[in-house]
Amino acid sequence: MQPADLAITLRRRSPWESMDLGLTMLQRWGRQVYLPHLMIALPITGAALALAWWLERPWVALALVWWLKPVFDRVVLHVLSRAVFGELKDTRTVLAAWKEWLFAGLVPSLLLRLVWFDLNRSFVLPARQLEGQRGRAGRERRSVLGRRTGSYAVWLTLVCFALEVLVLWTSFGLITELFVPAKADEGKSLLHLFVGDVDNPGTLLGWDDAFAYPAAVMLLEPFYVAAGFGLYLSRRTQLEGWDIEVALRRIAQRHVVALLVAVVAILSFAATPGYAQEKDAKTEIRSVLEDKQFGYYKDVKRWERRDRDKKPSDIDTTWLQALGYALAKIGELLLWVGAGAAVAYAIWWIVRKLPSRGPPPREPYQPPAALFGMDLAPEKLPPDVAAAAAALAREGQLRDALGLLYRGALSELVHKRGLELLPSHTEGEAVKLAGLPYFSALVDAWQRCAYARRIPLAAEVENLAAGYGRAFA
């Protein structure tokens, strides 16, 4: 492949214009690029999703797609590089030549992604894949190419990352959520992006993300590779003078005869004895190269006044300049105050939304005055509850005896033993909280008597009265 075979116009371009050239190439050959790109990316993405489904971990699909981006990039660069040099191939030919573009520096790229985020990946990819240099020579070559251009490649990566994550991933994620049941993502908010789900950390990334992120990668990655390839072509044009070579070749094609005549004339004149004595070729070349037109490059940036060519006015505008300066300072102060207030409000809002470290302090327990319709005040109970209940049982007042034992037991639990019973508790919950076999038997007898109208035997009530003292001794 020779620079003269290029299908694009070579000239000096700024880095931003070079990236735009790459996007223009993708626009021109988009169909030839996206077909093989999707035929490679779709099976890999499907395998990643299948593995994530088998492991029940959606983030596995995202991690694999991100890690295998160099595989997607290589087929895109292969098609673009061939198209630029006038060798545009169809999809079948590109896939058949997979050994030519797949393994060119693939393993180092994959290993590098595990330990380092290569922010100029799109720019160094052509040097790895197309030039094939390895080791120290490859590092030196990439270092030379990256001068004056590497920072632009980093900015390209950051901008594409923002588009991929904040625009495409979010948009595709919202679309995929339309096909997810409503309760699957219930309770998600923007806060989950930063702190996750405290109760269930595994729900930070769902299956909607697992499908949305690969879609964003497959759509944006050719743009990223094409823009980096445009930077690479522009840098090689600067270093190797491709534009000059192409221009000279075209001049030579138009003026072959004239050049041949000129060469013959020069050679004839140089063959004369006097010419060799009068002129020294090395001295002449050295004197020519010392001119600033050759081997001299200087990039200067400076601020200049727009009105530098205007003549100074006789009107004194010093006060107006001072007023403008004061207003500018006041505006700057207000801007900083507003920014500080916005940051303080954002911090306050985030702190409010963050989950608290623990439950709020509980209020001290106050025993209720009555439970289950029974007055629990100790002063309203007889001094000896068991004896009073046994006396009522002997007189045949079995329901009253059970009620007195029940009241006394509840009063003992809440006032003396500190059991935190509330009016909202049921009798079954009170039995579980008390954990006393006697209290369980007493509640069972009371429920049969009060609700089922099954009056217990006098002996059973007397036994409960006798066990009262032992249970609450």
Image: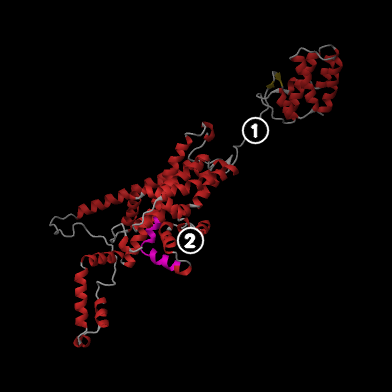
Mark 2 or mark 1, whichever is nearer to me: 2
Q: Would you name the residue on which mark 2 appears? A: 105
Helix, strand or loop at label 2? It is: loop
Q: Is residue 32 visible?
A: yes
Foreground of the two, 455 or 278: 278
**18 sits left or right of 197 in the view:** left
Q: Is residue 197 visible?
A: no
Q: Earlier in the sequence, mark 2 or mark 1?
A: 2
Q: How many marks?
A: 2
Query: Residue 153 magenta-drawn?
Result: yes
**241 sits left or right of 130 in the view:** left
Residue 344 at x, y = what percent? 44, 45
**Which quarter of the image is occupied by the C terminus?**
top right
Query: Residue 416 magenta-drawn?
Result: no
Q: Residue at x 39, y 54 (%)?
A: 79
Q: Would you name the residue on which mark 1 appears? A: 364
**Amino acid type indicated by mark 1:** Pro
What residue span does the magenta drawing correspond to? 138-155
